[in-house]
Image (cartoon, rainbow, N blue to C red):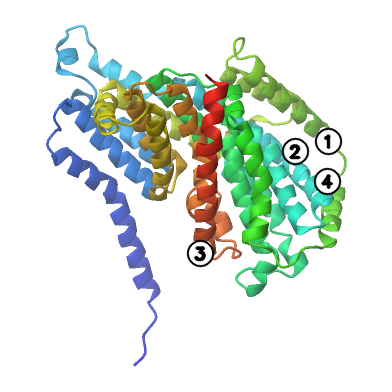
Amino acid sequence: MTNSAPTPKTVHSNQSLKKMVLLALPFIVTLIILLIPVPNGLEPHAWYFFAIFLGVIVGLIFEPLPGAVIGFTGIVVIALFSQWTLFTPEQLADPNFRQANQAFSWAVSGFGNSTVWLIFGAFMFAAGYDKTQFGKRLSLILVKYLGKRSLTLGYAITFADLLLAPFTPSNTARSGGTIYPIIANLPSLYDSKPNDPSARKIGSYLMWVAIAATCVTSSMFLTALAPNLLALPFVSEIANINISWGNWFLAFLPLGVILLLLVPLITYWVYPPEVKFNKEVPLWAAKELEKLGPLSKHEILLILFVFSALFMWIFATSIIEPALAAMLIIVLMLWSGVLNWNDILNNKPAWNTLTWFATLVALASGLTKVGFIAWVGEIGSAVLSGYSPIMSTLLLVTTFYLLHYLFASTTAHTTALLPVFLTVGMAVPGIDMFVLSLMLVTSLGIMGIITPYGTGPSPIYYGSGFLPAKDFWRLGTIFGFIFLIGLIGLGYPWMSFIFQ
């Protein structure tokens, strides 16, 4: 008796059924929450808002449609039914209250958020790196000088990501789009092949170092990961705390430096390459650099522009809003020819992220507006009663970090959980909210290491053929534990000391 292979028609039917289920899932979850009686202490309109919000989060997790579509749908539905989702009966009874205008103003409020435009600006910086090929040049230079030994090649990959991170708000673009295409050429020089025992010669080592390094740099810089920037308005609105680029960098600096130095070394110990030395890699990088030629005028201008932006983000925030500084640099890039207007128009990831994050900012602020977050805070404070402020902080950070196992998107994780954990923290007497906020937001990058779906570039490296599932999960557990212990054991005392 033989098993017949599924026909193309059967496969297509199964795929269609799966897509229909995923499309229906956000609506089913929303309907289930709506049918649950409103909890005690919560206004009905807040519960209905939460039901739609949760449906959006489910949509962001499973992505039956692009995230921007899911978020935009949630905004429109809530605004259309604003009489039941946004406003109290007292507001609606006020003859001077203009419901339609207020609903629309809330729906588009995210597009007026400065952080959203800072994200957009950072995407344009990344476009400049790509168009001028300066990002590729940086990576090749490091490989040329550090690529002779496997260990130093790991450091070359790490430092390449570090150099690109402050100006690339997407670790998918930075690591998956710039670093990966370069290092994908290296294993073959060692006769290391994907989906083959020879993968362990060096390919596996390089791929793991790359994904681990980008998780660290994603936490090290505010502008290295888009959800980092998304987190700021949540912290500002809920905790009334403003975190600057410099605050963020200083908070994670000691831990970030140590982790960046340890990632290639620990990988070398726990997942060692079989080949330790190869003189061909630097020669290959040198040839690739020769093809690029000398620094172009546009590369030089780009260097000047990005350092100017960095200077303004760190030292001039009292004079110029960071988002406006980014816009200024974009204007300079356009007038100087580093980018042209079509580069702006054709940058689909930037416009997609702008729409996506603007809707998520509005949705998250709406939870606060309707009183849901305050209600959650009261419940959380009751659960943590009896714990010291220090223990409460560590419990909140650890729980926030480990819950990332449930998310395939750091954006969805940030949107769903950060407002809740901030609110719970505010309800705990004596807790240092500035330190707690920094601990939570700087964990967003490093938590991506724990699963093969934890952050944008993870599926790229997981699908490279050099990191089998059992290896990825094992290494994710090891490095995830190291990163978390580092954040608690070093990050917490350092942040408490430096921002006391």
Q: Secondary structure at mark 2?
A: helix
Q: Secondary structure at mark 3?
A: helix
In this view, 139 is above or below 220: below
- Residue 322, by quadrant, is top right
In this view, 51 is above or below 186: above
Q: Which mark is residue 132?
A: 2
In this view, 233 is above or below 30: above
Residue located at (43% from left, 49% from top)? 408
- Residue 345 in the image: x percent, y percent? 58, 33
- Residue behind mark 4: 292
Q: Earlier in the sequence, mark 4 or mark 3?
A: 4
- Residue behind mark 1: 296
Residue located at (42% from left, 41% from top)? 398
The residue type indicated by label 1 comes to Ser
Say whether marks 4 and 2 touch (CB < 8 Å): no
- Residue behind mark 3: 469
Front: mark 4 or 3: 3
- Residue 466, by quadrant, is bottom right
- Residue 104 in the image: x percent, y percent? 32, 21
Say whether marks 3 and 2 touch (CB < 8 Å): no
Say whether marks 1 and 2 touch (CB < 8 Å): yes
- Residue 337 in the image: x percent, y percent? 74, 28
Left or right: residue 437 compared with residue 41: right
Left or right: residue 387 compared with residue 112: left
